[in-house]
Image (tube, grey):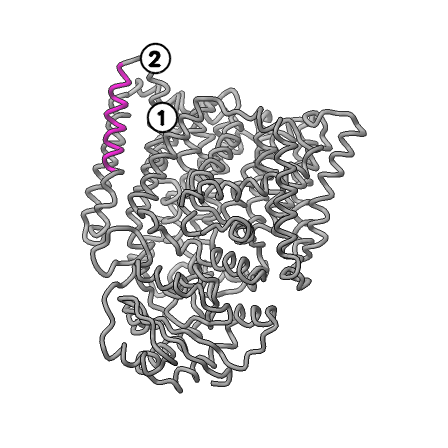
Amino acid sequence: MLIENFVVPLFYAIPLGLGILLLWRCRPGLPIMVLLTAFFLGAVVIARTFEIAERWYVLDHIYGALVGSIILLSTLGILLGLPTLRGFRLPRAPLILAALVAAPAYLYEFFWLSSFPFTDLFADIHSMKIAVELARSHVLNNIDGASYIQVKPILTGILISAFGHDPLAGAWAIAPWTAAFKVLVAWQASQLVDRTGNRMLAFALLSGTLLGFELGNGTLCMLGSIMLLVLLGDFGAKIEKSWTAVGSILLLSIGALLFWRALNPYALPSVAFLVGVPILGGIVGTLTRASAEKSIWLFALFIFVLIGCLVPLHRVSVLYILIAAAAAATWRLRDWPWLVTTMAWTARASTLAAGIIPLLALGIWIFGTNNPLSLDDAFFEIMKLFGGSVSAELLLGLGVKNAVIEWGAATGALFAMLVFAAFLYSILSPDGRALWKEPLFALYWALAAGLTCFILTGFPFAYRAMPFVCVFFALALSTALPRLWIRAGEPYRMAAALPALLGLTYAAVMTLPPLVTFSRFYIPLAAGLVLAGIATLITATRPAWRAGSLVALLAFTLMADRLSARAILFPHSYGKPTNTISAITHYSADEIELANYMKKLPLSTIIVSDPFTTSIIRARTGLDSPYSYSNLDTLNESSERFLRIVLRAASSGDRDGFCHALAKMLPSASEYAYLMKRMHQEVHTVAAVIAYSSRTRAWQDSAQGQRGSYFPATAALDEPTVRGIEQLAEGKIHWSGEIALAGLSCTPEG
């Protein structure tokens, strides 16, 4: 585990080094932005290169040379960029503030909720499976990769192959680096605050709401889009005429987006462009002899590169890039009084509408009529227009209920209270109404409220725009809160009492029947909030400490409040535990032992078990299953039906029934079929392994489409089931306390 501390930083360092090498002659005068963009560029180029090699069916032949070349080029880039890296410094105040927010959150999530190694594996099951399979077979098995490239599994696969990285053991070690990455993005976003706002306050709000330890393609795309917003604003500031700047921002953003969307399916030309554009930037910079900070062409090329990195990361990039472009264009017109006035009225109307929509939906749900108001059909038609399809997965992101839950989880109660208080102040107080004449408040509030309205309509997965809602509200609040604080008479006692009150309120809620099982996990948060209030009361007596302590309190309380909101949603997120739990974990020690035991099985082996157990084994071994899924709740109806038949046959010892039902499932085992094809193995017999536990029994006996608990079932199997599995097995079964593991062979025809 100690080795992982030295290995996991390479997840960021390898693409960073390659990106620095590519951007060596094209680097605008924004040091943090250069480093962040270099990471994105390196990560996308590496992922695209692996994708090209796999599409040409040569990855397995050149895998070792490719990994070695990437590490070598990355090392060269880091060495060339050392002067830039040596000059990279964050001011002391944001460093202290970021540590105050990140350290308690890290300790809480990784050592209290899920003491190592009991971490949330289901957030990374697909990524870990692809990474382990890539490292073992040198095949990039990415059947569902049409909408985005697999950055995380490819980088993880490189670490596994070159340095013996263990994705599960490294999950706790990489988290601080991910937090640092997000803090850098939050610091960049705080630079959007002009002289009328408070940048440290904005940073406190942003770090409190954006900080987290999870990382996926969607998260990377979101962080890159926030950077794009900053870069587009800086780009527009270098163009004198406002309308010219707006036109340039929109044309550059939308043109680049459309260009890269058209190019996205074709990996080779997209890599050629991503590598070629920085080289072109270096040539332009050399020929014009203009510093990167002043050259508008270099800024345009820099933005073009960043958009080119975002598009293949995730399909949501279309939404993010358009939001960033619209916000940057709007901000460039902040000196136009008519626009500020228009946006101010729009902001007020949108805020009121955002409050009415959930109430209206609640009223319709309570007083339901024969013809309830629903926009679902309209949403489905819109999704079809953009090439989407109506599926079970789409339904997971639909509806006002989901939207309200996601909005609340992303912001937390305190952030929502600050938004509400600032809005009341802006409409009820004479000096508060003056805020609507401030561009920083009016424009960003209008954008945040407008996006909130869009999200609360329940449009499928519209809540993915929540990071921008948090950013825009944070920027607006950085202007409003200092004025509100002074207007309220600097209420230090209330500021000290509020976090303590929040902590005690959440603690009381955690005693309710649906939540009482999880109540022990809330103790550190409640204690932290109470202590934060006491600390604020003490520091308020010393004038020199007041401002800093209030900002620190705000950042810490926002972080703790968001974690508290997540605690309230534990039953919604994970289901009901089967018994008393000691950690938020989705697998038992026996299940991990079983998965580690199965690592020695050949990759041609197919796993047969319930989706939960299957996910654990896939993530640890890289093995495939006879069905595919993107979410544990969206298993294909046919696959779900036949899987239950397979499991019932296994538990009763019916070999013929087992093989017949398994044969019916094989046509949907696309990942297994692809791997066998790439490994040049003809499937005459299917080597299947059945993993059966009390968790498997519970899933097998549940109703079609019923959502199960994410927690492991630790009860021992009954003797008739064990005897049935022994009859099914070819040879002796492997027994791991709670789980029976049996191997057998079936023909593809059953």
Crowding at mark 2 (Cα within 10 Å: few <14, some 14-19, many 20+): few
Q: Quadrant of residue 388?
A: bottom right
The first of marks 2 and 1 along the sequence is: 2
Q: Position of residue 670 (x, y in %)?
A: 54, 70
Q: Nearer the viewer, residue 172 or 71?
A: 71
Q: Nearer the viewer, residue 434 or 279?
A: 279
Q: Position of residue 78 (x, y in %)?
A: 61, 35
Residue at image position (33%, 46%) is 566
Left or right of residue 706: residue 80: right
Mark 2 and mark 1: Cα distance apart in space: 14 Å
Task: Look at the numbered discs 2 and 1 and tell me whether their residues touch, using CB distance below 8 Å.
Answer: no
Q: Is residue 557 magenta?
A: no
In this rendering, the answer to whether 658 lies above or below 24 is below
Residue at image position (78%, 25%) is 289
Q: Secondary structure at mark 1?
A: helix
In this rendering, the answer to whether 656 lies above or below 318 is below
Q: Secondary structure at mark 2?
A: helix
Magenta-drawn segment = 526-541
Query: Residue tagged by mark 1?
Result: 552
Q: Nearer the viewer, residue 329 or 11?
A: 11
Query: Residue tagged by mark 2?
Result: 544
At label 1, the amino acid type is Ala
